[in-house]
Image (cartoon, grey):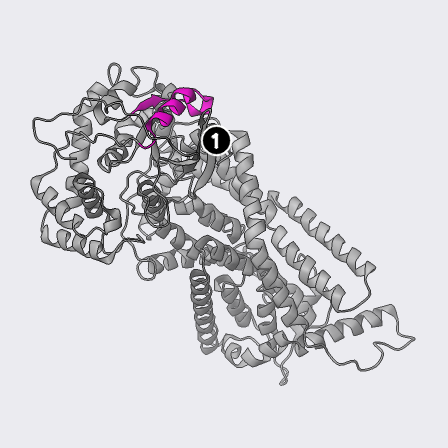
Amino acid sequence: MTESAGEHAGARPAAATPPKLAARQRVVLVGNPNVGKSTLFNALTGQRARVGNYPGVTVELREGQARLGPELEVEVVDVPGSYSLSARSAEEQIALDCVLGLASQPAPELVVLVVDAGQLIRNLYLALQLVELRVPLVIALNMIDEVTDAPPSPSAISQLLGVPCVSTNARKREGLVPLREAMASALGVTPSGALALRYPKALIEDADRVAEGLPDSWRRNVERDRALGLWALGSLEPDDELEHIPQGLRDRCLRAHEQAGDRDLDREIIATRYAFLDAHAAELYEGAQPAGEKRASSERVDRVLLHPVFGFVIFLAVMLVLFQTLFSWADPLISLVEATFGGLSRMVEGALPDGLLRDFLVEGLIGGVGNVVVFLPQILLLFLFIGLLEDTGYMARVAYLMDRIMRSLGLHGRAFVPMLSGFACAVPAILATRTMERWRDRLLTMLVIPLMTCSARLPVYTLIIAALFPPATVLGVLPVQGLLMVAMYLFSVLVALVSAAVIGRTVVKGRQVPLILELPPYRLPNPLAVLRMMWERSWLFLREAGTVILAATVVLWVLLSFPKLPESGPASAPTATAEHAEEDGAARRARQLEHSYAGRVGHAIEPALEPLGFDWKIGVGIIGAFAAREVFISTMGLVYGIGEVDDDDPQSLRDKIRSEKRDDGTPAYTPLAGLSLMIFFALACQCMSTLAVVKRETRGYRWPAFLFAYMTGIAYLASLLVFQLGRAMGF
């Protein structure tokens, strides 16, 4: 904290004998993103936390036990990466709560700050905040192997800050023994806080006034209360996302900012801290301050990969491979999953008599599980690529390249890769937003990803275009059907970007935070870490999202299957051929569907669908498509009584849709109605899997409900506009 002009830091904290401690004391690992914090956590605990070379990989708490001595075992908590304790994101708020013991988090007996030896001064900014707040602290000077010329001096850092500092190389498990010894000695020992940090007098007065609004449970002593006042001045703003903050404290901060006039209080705090670090930087190294060999090599590569022209060309090539992987390379695995569940369904059908139990197992249970597991190949491949890009350090460059474009739309640079993955499937794309450290950016990205044209929409587009748009060319060269398909993809991108700009300025408002991103040195990926991440994310999807998807699928099956038609005699005459029996069965399934709850709902909503060019049959297809968009095809096959429909070649269904007539003999479905239907499918959130994953990621029903409402609303309005304007123009 602030001291008189004649006081200087320099003495180590006085030796103290810590009190006898109970087992399993709490130790919190904190640090900037990408400093090797999760790697050190793994080394200390033997756990297998996700390890990456991309800022913000750890977005949830990881806990494990570490033995610091023969009779001393502690609980170690790995918290999300944080550049400071300003807590301007949900992840930084978690770090703040864990460090100070706020909200429901217990106060730790020790905080271990993991520092990147190659980025010392920037990393020590967080150390200053921790020392000011008087938390028991040990600094782990990590990745020391990457600074070969004049590395940072642990003793000099310890001398300056008054806390123990130990050099480590977590990747090679070097320096762990001294670190464990330092942790054992520092448990419960409060730093001296003797920093020669001189804040402006007016700023100190502001901090003291704000500190008067601290809750009693937060108060410790004058110095710590003042440090919390400074933290509040630099963190609490009108549009912040912080929880657990008393309104009185928030109001005092806002008044302080208003009364400051032209003074930028946040800038004053930051400038004072960095001025202190810069003034002492020369004495923190064992020789001249180095750039680091690996950093220099990375900078040479960045001249190409971050070039305004060549960088984008390389990036597009990488994304093309990723896109091709998710779109095409996953097909054999997806086909294998579908064949497996199809074989299981046939086995159950052959083993059980016709009846309610068989229908439930085949169509509800096995079909519901299959609708979940079919996404697994894409999820595995997506996270394989993301893991490799993270570990090499290239993912951070992608965010940097795209930030300028995305920022103009209210999005974050890191949103681009998840949005691109949405072309394959929204489910893994939403999971991929976990690499974004700021909650507001994650939420906004999740709310627009489902607008990207996923692969499940492709069979629907193919059916409608083939059925209602005859083969023709524009200018004698360009095929109309192909142009329509391309137009639907471009349309989805445009709507997603416009929606992001609107939602980001209304529903999910937040200040435009610049991209603060460390470009880490390039490293070889860790194959085991990538494979563990693939398994963890895939299992998380199957375990948590899958339960919701399965339950919703079963509910949909009930709606499509009940109430049952009354029996009306034998299904067919004794002399009926197998073909006629199959036709009778298909016709009965069609009548059953119309008689079902879903069919009744279709008839009920038909008046609302008619202005879009749809009838009740399309309404039933839309209801069925909530299980998965491609289910629209098989549902329409049931509606028209033609039995099972092959998604890849639904020729009979195309002919049926094309030849369908109204009572007056006019075509029931025109190209204009087909275009309206494609617009509706492009914009509506007809995917229970997506809603289930958003529910899981946002931990509640509020945002899935909003997602469903706004997407369905704009889908209806856009389809209405297209159909009515087209009809007015004579199409």
Number of numbered discs present?
1
Is residue 353 shown in magenta? no
Q: Which residue lies at the image location 16% right of the left edge and 36% below the top edge?
A: 271
What is the x, y in percent for residue 463? Answer: 62, 62
Q: Is residue 164 above or below residue 358?
A: above
Report the side of 259 relative to 273 (left or right). left
* Secondary structure beneath label 1: helix
> In the rendered image, which residue does mark 1 sit on?
45
What is the x, y in percent for residue 387? Answer: 49, 36
Tell me the magenta residue range.
Answer: 164-188
Report the side of 388 relative to 354 (left or right). left
What amino acid does circle 1 point to?
A: Thr
Q: Quadrant of the N terminus?
A: top left
What is the x, y in percent for residue 627? Answer: 59, 62
519 and 137: which is toward the camera: 137
Q: Quadrant of residue 576?
A: bottom right
428 and 537: which is toward the camera: 537
Q: Quadrant of residue 658?
A: bottom right
Q: Which residue lies at the image location 35% right of the left edge and 52% below the top edge?
A: 440
Is residue 170 shown in magenta? yes
538 and 248: which is toward the camera: 248
What is the x, y in percent for residue 447? Answer: 42, 57
Q: Which residue lies at the image location 20% right of the left edge and 28% below the top edge?
A: 277
Q: Badge 1: few (under 14), some or many (20 or more) residues near its Cα, within 10 Å?
A: some
Q: Is residue 158 above or below residue 707?
A: above
Q: Residue furthest bottom?
A: 664
Examine the rendering and report whether any part of residue 570 can be seen. yes
Examine the rendering and report whether any part of residue 470 can be seen. no
Q: Is residue 234 above or below residue 521?
A: below
